[in-house]
Image (tube, grey):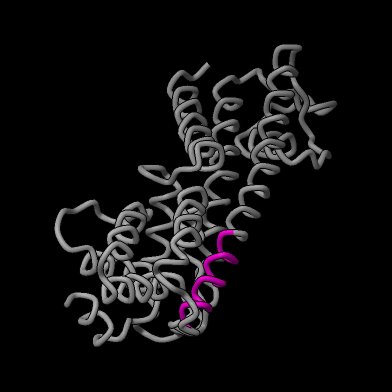
Amino acid sequence: MDPIVLILGLVVLAAVTLDFLAVTVGATMRATLTGHVGHLVFMGMRAAARWGGEALFTRVSGVVVMSAVATVWIVGTWVGWSLIYGSFAGSLAMGPTGVEPEAPDFAAHTGHLLSTLGGARTAPSAAPWGIVGVLVGVNGMVVLTASVSFLLSVRQTVQAGRAFATLQDLEALDPAEDLPRLAELVAGLHAAPFALWYAAPRLDRQLPAAILGFARDSHARGGTAWRRVEVVLRDLPHLPQRDGPLLPVLAAWAQAHTIQRMDEGEVRAADA
């Protein structure tokens, strides 16, 4: 047994599993591995868009971020179990050949268990490793099926966000009457915050810009309507919790979630 490889495998598997549970079951992205991954991938696309291809990056931003998140979960689980198998030299048998398994064989065995594709050249060397194989299979089933379910919830939030942005663009939202719609959208973003990385071709139809516009309209109206909207908006995911005026912070938040450069006049209006 190689204790270093075993510990490394357990650490990788635990980190990925805890992140997976926090995001899909706990409905949070605060201080999670995939939350940071999604942020870094989006920031990378936004930086690359400054050199060209802004329209392309805008169209694919959500798909790329979610693909990166799914890759972290699937590959992380695969690597963790592969290291656990590889830490025990006698964990697998190579069938009739009798050849000692090598690193690719451990990875292939784990991949076949996680995906239930079959066709592996390896087999458990003893009954306890057969039980471990069952755990790997169940783990793979949970990750794959729960990932699909989580993706559906993200898509539902994206659709709700695009409907909100369309109504805001058409000036069909009223800060007083549509507060419940805003509160429901913010709650949905907390359950599926990756929806913020999905963009629309038109900047004014993108959710961050729409939320900023709704906030400006509410601020212009003032009174009870603005106070209520402000309370709801301060609960947005990724929004820095700072004292003082909300609009400048919200303008920076909207730009941070947008591939395109927002109109300077619009940002200055929010800062006013």
Viewed as shown, does residue 30 lie left or right of 242?
right
Residue 229, quarter of picture? bottom left
Please say if 62 is above or below 97.
below
Residue that sits furthest to the left in the current view: 244
**56 vs 1, nearest the viewer:** 56
Q: Where is residue 50 shown, x and y percent of the image? A: 34, 82
Viewed as shown, does residue 3 lie left or right of 25?
left
Q: Where is residue 270 shown, x and y percent of the image? A: 24, 76
Q: Quadrant of the C terminus?
A: bottom left
The span picked out in magenta is 157-169
- Residue at 52% from the left image edge and 47% from the top image edge: 72
**205 vs 233, nearest the viewer:** 233
- Residue at 42% from the left image edge and 74% from the top image edge: 210
Viewed as shown, does residue 138 lie left or right of 187?
right
Q: Where is residue 217 shown, x and y percent of the image? A: 33, 76
Q: Where is residue 71 shown, x and y percent of the image? A: 56, 51
User: Would you say residue 269 sits in the magenta stretch?
Assistant: no
